[in-house]
Image: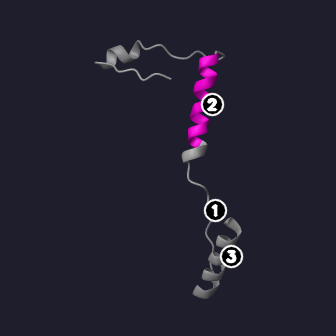
Amino acid sequence: MPIRKFRSLSEAGEAERFRPGTAEFSRGLRCVFWMAARFAPSRKAPPGVHKFRSIEEAQARKRERAGKQK
C-alpha cells in the first residue's frame, strides 16, 4: 500500500478509501492482521489475580510456567 501525504485535513477527507469486497481491501485487511499477530505481545501469565501462601510458592509457580513456555 502506498503512503500518501496531505498538506491539509481537507485533502485527507477527499482521499480514496478501500471498498469492502475488493482485492485491495482484502490485501489491506490481511496486512493489518499480520502486523497485529506479529507485534502484539504474547500472553506470558494466565489472566486474573493469583494469591500464594508464600514467596517460595509464587517463585515455584513462576519457574513452572517458564519451563512450559520454552
Find the residue positioned furthest to the right: 68
Residues in magenta, as a range: 23-36
- The residue at the far left in this view is 7
| Viewer can see residue 54 | no
Location of residue 15 in the rendering, given as x and y in whole percent from the top left corner: 43, 14
Q: Quadrant of residue 10?
A: top left
Dot 2 or dot 1: first in sequence order is 2
Q: Residue at x 64, y 17 (%)?
A: 23
Quickly name the residue at label 3.
64
Query: How are the colours assigned in the image?
Result: one colour
The residue at the point 68 percent across, 76 percent down is 64
* Amino acid at circle 1: Pro
Quarter of the figure with residue 44: bottom right
Dots 1, 3 in contact, CB < 8 A? no
Write the residue at 66% across / 16% down.
Answer: 21
Q: Quadrant of residue 50?
A: bottom right
Residue nearest the viewer, comparing 18 with 13:
18
